[in-house]
Image (cartoon, rainbow, N blue to C red):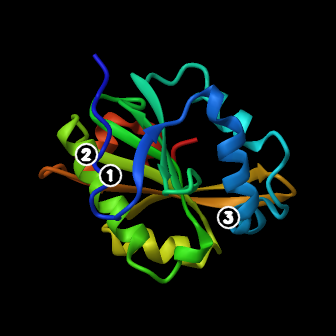
Amino acid sequence: MPIPLPPSSLLPHVRVLELQASDEDLLQRFYERNPLYFEQVNGTPPRPDEAREEIRDLPPEGWSFSAKRLLGYVDDDGELVAMASLVSDLMAPRVWLVGLFIVATSLHGSPAAREIYAELERWMQRNGARWVRLGVVVGNHRAERFWERRGFVEVRRRDGLTMGQRVNELRVMVKPLDGGRIDEYLAMVPRDRPGEP
């Protein structure tokens, strides 16, 4: 049975839909109109197949997970104003990953990103999340501040990650929900313990 999508009532005239392969052009247009993330992280604008790859992309082989959801926030004109890629039960039960979260550049500085993420987090929690995990590229200052202000804490760093034309260092960050603790999380996800290979 499908999980109902998070409500979009916080942003008037925006509805949430689950993006499918048939929405590739819609997602690609959004990426091309909002290239800032790709320029900062990859050192280049989005590739022509960026949306196709995101729709098809799954966690690495050997990583357990229960589902990947790709959500789009669509305005009255039928265009995306935000997107989120989520993976549930990643490597351990009740650990959810925010793989990618992009809000239109025109909405930066507004409450939109905070409101969308707050509702997304409540929705993840209602559907079983006890911890939320993500990775933030070191030097992507806006993103680092955003996630820190949402209550995420760094558990380790990974360096030497090739992303587009850049080699980046990644901050692995976790937020406990529902009374969960970081030490409990690290016991369940040894990969994220500091010093683990």
Q: Check disc 2 and report its element: helix, strand or loop.
A: helix
Sequence-first tag of 3 and 1? 3
Query: Marks 1 and 2: in contact by CB < 8 Å?
Result: yes
The front one of 46 and 154 is 46
- Give the quadrant of residue 119: bottom left
For marks 2 and 1, give the CA distance.
5 Å
Binning the other alpha carbons within 10 Å of mark 3 as few (below 14), some (14 to 19) or many (20 upward) gives many
Residue 30, percent across and down? 67, 55
Which quadrant of the view contains residue 136?
bottom right
User: What kind of residue is marked 1?
Assistant: Leu
What residue appears at the point 33 percent right and 44 percent down from the top-left corner?
186
Tell me the residue that label 3 is attached to.
37
For badge 3, the amino acid type reads Tyr
Counting labels gives 3
Q: Residue furthest bottom?
A: 109
Left or right: where does residue 131 sit relative to residue 180? right
Mark 3 lies on a secondary structure that is helix
Quarter of the image with the C terminus is: top right
Q: Pinpoint residue 52: horizontal percent, then vertical percent.
A: 73, 34
Q: Nearer the viewer, residue 160 or 37?
A: 37
Q: Is residue 122 above or below residue 144?
A: above
Q: Is residue 195 above or below residue 33?
A: above
Q: Is residue 156 left or right of residue 106?
A: left
Q: Quadrant of the N terminus?
A: top left
As helix, strand or loop, the secondary structure at mark 1 comes to helix
Amino acid, disc 2? Trp
**For mark 2, what is the residue?**
123
- In this rendering, position of residue 68 left or right of residue 57: left
Disc number placed over residue 102 in the picture, else none: none
Residue corresponding to mark 1:
120
Which tag, 3 or 2, sits closer to the chain's start?
Answer: 3
List the single residue furthest toward the front: 77
